[in-house]
Image (spheres, helix red, strand yellow):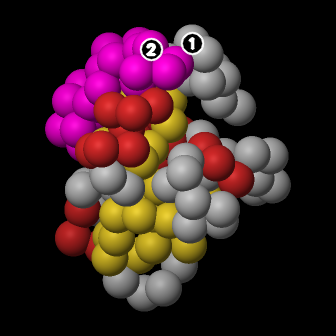
Amino acid sequence: MTIVDQKHAAQIVTTKGKVFKYDAIECLINDAKNHDEQEIAFKKVADFMGLDSFTDAESAFYLISADIPSPMGANLSAFASKKEAEAMQQSKEGELFDWVTVQQKIKQH
């Protein structure tokens, strides 16, 4: 898959080294159910604040903001630190999530 916007990219890497790339975090969330959790080495999401920088999906903080459009329309961005996520929320508004709650939010749609 061609990644259109690196700031919203995500990936799953299996224990065998196979990489599944996504152009939006919600695509990773929706596709993760198609993978055996035991076979996933890690899930990474692009840190919105870092140029071409990825962070662990399970420890990242997430912001859904209409003021930050994403490629697949969920307006979902990831941040390596809670402080950066909160600062972005102050300027762009929106709702903050952790890994567990963002999965629940995306799976509802």
Looking at the rendered structure, the kind of residue marked 2 is Glu
Residue that numbered label 1 is attached to: 66
Residue that numbered label 2 is attached to: 93
Magenta stretch, main secondary structure, is helix
x%, y% of residue 7?
64, 48
Label 2 crowd (10 A; few <14 / some 14-19 / many >=20) = some
Q: In this view, does 18 lie above or below 81?
A: below
Q: In this view, does 41 lie above or below 57?
A: below
Mark 1 and mark 2 in contact (Cβ < 8 Å)? yes
> Which residue is painted at 41% across and 15% down in the image?
94
Q: Is residue 92 above or below residue 12?
A: above
Q: Residue furthest bottom?
A: 16
Q: Is residue 7 left or right of residue 1?
A: left
Q: Does residue 107 appear in the picture of this structure?
A: no
Most foreground residue, 3 or 107: 3
Q: In this view, does 1 lie to the left or right of 60?
A: right
Quadrant in the picture for the C terminus: top left
Residue 18 on the magenta span = no
> Which residue is painted at 23% across and 38% down in the image?
98
In the image, the segment drawn in magenta is 89-109
Quadrant in the picture for the N terminus: bottom right
Residue 99 on the magenta span = yes
Instruction: Give the mark nearer the N terminus: 2 vs 1.
Output: 1
What secondary structure is found at the residue carrying circle 2? loop
Label 2, label 1: how far apart the Cα atoms are = 8 Å
Q: Which of marks 2 and 1 is in front?
A: 2
